[in-house]
Structures are given as C-alpha cells and as structure tokens.
Amino acid sequence: MDYFIRKDNTLFAEECRVAELAKSYGTPLYVYSRATIERHWHAFDDAAGEQPHLICYAVKANSNLAILNLLARLGSGFDIVSKGELARVLAAGGDAAKVVFSGVAKKSDEIRYALEQGIYCFNVESAPELARINRVAGELGVKAPVSLRVNPDVDAGTHPYISTGLKENKFGISIEDAEALYLAADNLPHLEVKGIDCHIGSQLTELTPFLDALDRVLVLINKLAATGIKLSHLDVGGGLGVCYRDETPPHPKEYAKALAEKLAGYDLTLLYEPGRAIMANAGILVTEVEFLKTNQDRHFAIVDAAMNDLIRPSLYQSWQEIIPVEQRRDVDELSYDVVGPVCETGDFLGKDRLLAIKPGDLLAVRSAGAYGFTMSSNYNSRPRAAEVLVDKDSRHLIRERETLAQLWQGERLLP
Ligand code: LLP
C-alpha cells in the first residue's frame, strides 16, 4: 500500500499534486513519499514483534541521505556493501553499531574504515576475505565481529540476475564448507564469531525458498552448537518481493511468523535486510512526453526519462506500471512503447502500454523508489534526475538535478 493516489483524475503524492512538483522541479523527477517509507519500515519492525531483531535497511535500494536519515530516525540499522554506503549512513546520522557489511570483495581500506567506525558485523563471503578481515583487525588491535554468509543452494525463483543463493552464484560460502570455516574463524585471534547470514535473492514472491534456506541454515547452526560455537544472531538477508503488477508477495507479517515457527527454541537475534520492500512502492519517476511517433509497426511515446534514469526495464525486462499524471478523455487510447531519448534500442521504460496521451503530458512510472536512482548513470551525458520527498502537503528537494558542469567534474584536459 502506498500514498500515490489519484483524486479527480489527477495524481497526488500524499497531499501534493504530482503535476505541480514536475512544474517546480522539472522532469525527469523522482518523487518519494515519507508516509509510505515509514509505513513499510514499521510493517517489518511490527512483524518481528517481541523477537529480538534489527531491521538493517539495504542501502543499495535507495541511498539518498534524506531517506537514510528518515530511517535512522526510526531506529533502523543498515546493510551496506561499500565504504561509500557506510559514509552515507554516517553522514545521514545512522548508527554504525547497527550496520552490517555485506558484499563479496571488501577491500582492506573498507574493512579498516568499518572497524574504526565500530560496525555491528561483517557478513563474510569467502575464506580469503575472512583472512583479510583478521589481518586488518590485528593491525588495528581489535577483534572484528563476523558472520559467514552461507549459500544454501536453493532456487529463489526470481530473475537469474538477482538470484544469489544457488551454487553457481558468486555469493557466500557453500553450506558444506561453512562448518570448517567457522572452526577456522573461531581460532583466528582477531575475529569474534557472532552470527550467520543468508541472502538468496531479490524480489521473492513465495515463502518456500526462504524457509528451505532456513532449514539448511538451522542444520548448520545445530552442528556448530555441537562443536561449541554459539551464534548470537541470524541474518535472513533481504529479498522479500513487492507488487509491481499482479505479484502477491507474502506480507512481512506472514514472513516473520513463518520464521518464528522454525526458530522456536533458538536464542537468536534476527536481522532482516529489506531494501525493495521498503522503497520500491514509495517512489515514482515522473517524465514528460516529448513526442508521439508512429511507424508502420508501432506507436512510440518518446519521453524525457531514459534507461540512464531507470535501468530496470532494460536490464531485467522488468515491468513497472506507467500511468498518466492527469487523465484525459479527449484522445483515444493507443498501445505505446514508452521509450527514452538514449541511443539504444534497449532504452525503454515499458512496452505495449495503453495510454491516452498528447505531447507535453506527464507520465509516472510507478514502483521506482528502489533500484531506480541508485542505478542511474550519466550515459549519453545526461545529468541525473532531481529527487523530491513529500511529507503530507510539504515537499522537500532532497537532491538537486545535476548540472552540466558536474558531468565532467574531475576530468582533466591533456597538458
Ligand atoms: N542483502 C543483500 C546481501 C543483498 O545483496 C540485497 C540485494 C539485499 C539485502 C536487499 O534485497 P531486497 O530486499 O531489496 O530484495 N537491482 C536489482 C536488485 C538487486 C538486489 C541486490 N541485492 C533490481 O532492480 O531488481
């Protein structure tokens, strides 16, 4: 459920007219709703209930400082994958002690920075990474808190590019190898073994893969307990899907309940790393129709947003709803391919969309709050879009549109 609502044929973001936002800030424009973000975060936190838990929002989904700050104010933790993401969390007022550091190749300087800031835990993805963390912690004279990210070899049933828990994927340590590595970690002088981590993919719309993975992880937890390694937390990763079109993903409540049933009798703090479930439907991308063009085969709506602004449709052939900001009845609906100005055939936001539109109209691409702006680029030397956050009837510019000079900032001419 979100707060992008149509009233009298016009789209509102909470109590702000989207057309007015576009007029003030221009297009393409990302618009986020504070109430939606908070609602989604609380849905997780409430679902976890009495079980000791920490919601570590996956920063990669949307890392705007204002959004991280909102979540920090709610008491959120953060899942980061780089020094840059940690720096953002800190700049936004996040608490390092609630940060988990994921990712397959943490560099030594990233590990050092995270240790200096006092993060909660590293999710370690390989034996050499474990050795590197031990070495850097030794240099600093501290003990690094670690979890091993295990790869349970289950099919998440999602797009192959965002499936991470199969043995052919680069992520994690196979369950078979994990026990020996836990024993090794336990014997390394500069590590403190804290927990176990498992993230099997993104946009999961069924509970079964999560629960199958958990079964395998619990077998390992039991084996470790038998060898005297007691873990204090279980990080179940992110991955809970959202509704883009007609998917019916489980509610966080159902998910948390199913986990709790399996975890009865275990004394573990639960960590969740949701990204998409909090942000996707809390944002839209607003774009203006530049031209309508028809050839022998198709109708095109050429808009001012492109694959550099929102790459998900091009990269994963993902479907996101596209709606007119103001509905009109004076033209017929036609089936359009909604395409951007970038010089690539793969530059589209949606295909075969029934729309009644004229040039100059505004369209909103829904479900664009996660993996939208964060995956945007300057391809075709296009300045990145502005971002606005609405809060009831107030609006806040949370990122200015990039300027042309910013496009070549840092570049140098030859002498
Ligand atoms: N934790 C880890 C270790 C992850 O790798 C990810 C996402 C998450 C948590 C958050 O997953 P979520 O709750 O958002 O599903 N760009 C793709 C999604 C890539 C997800 C990468 N990892 C897309 O636009 O669909």
Image: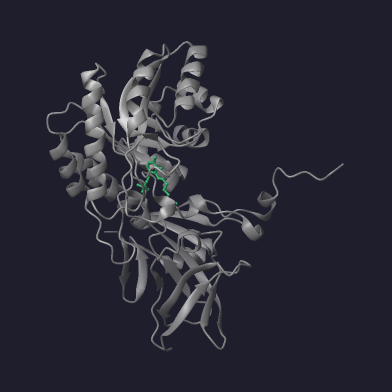
Tell me the residue at 56%/59% (across/down). Answer: 308
Q: In the rendered image of this protein, does residue 410 appear above or below residue 333?
A: above
- Closer to the camera in the image, 344 or 3: 344
Is residue 382 visible to us here? no
Residue drawn at x 55%, y 67% as measured from the top left:
346
Measured as percent of width and height from the top left, residue 15 is found at 33, 62
Q: Nearer the viewer, residue 226 or 401?
A: 226
Nearer-the-camera pick, 16 or 214: 214
Where does the N terminus fall, quadrant-wise? bottom left
Q: How is the image coloured?
A: one colour
Residue 123: quadrant of the picture: top left
Q: Position of residue 312 (x, y in %)?
A: 46, 59
Does residue 328 appear anywhere in the picture?
yes
Q: How many marks?
A: 0
The extreme front residue here reads: 176
Q: Position of residue 6 (x, y in %)?
A: 32, 70
> On the picture, is 321 further left or further right than 50?
right
Name the quadrant of the C terminus.
Answer: top right
Is 46 above or below relative to 122? below
Where is residue 9 drawn, in percent x and y? Answer: 34, 76
Towards the viewer: 194 or 293: 194
Toward which corner of the image does residue 226 lie, by quadrant?
top left
Say which residue appears at 13% left-offset and 39% top-offset: 261
Looking at the picture, does residue 201 appear above or below residue 226?
below
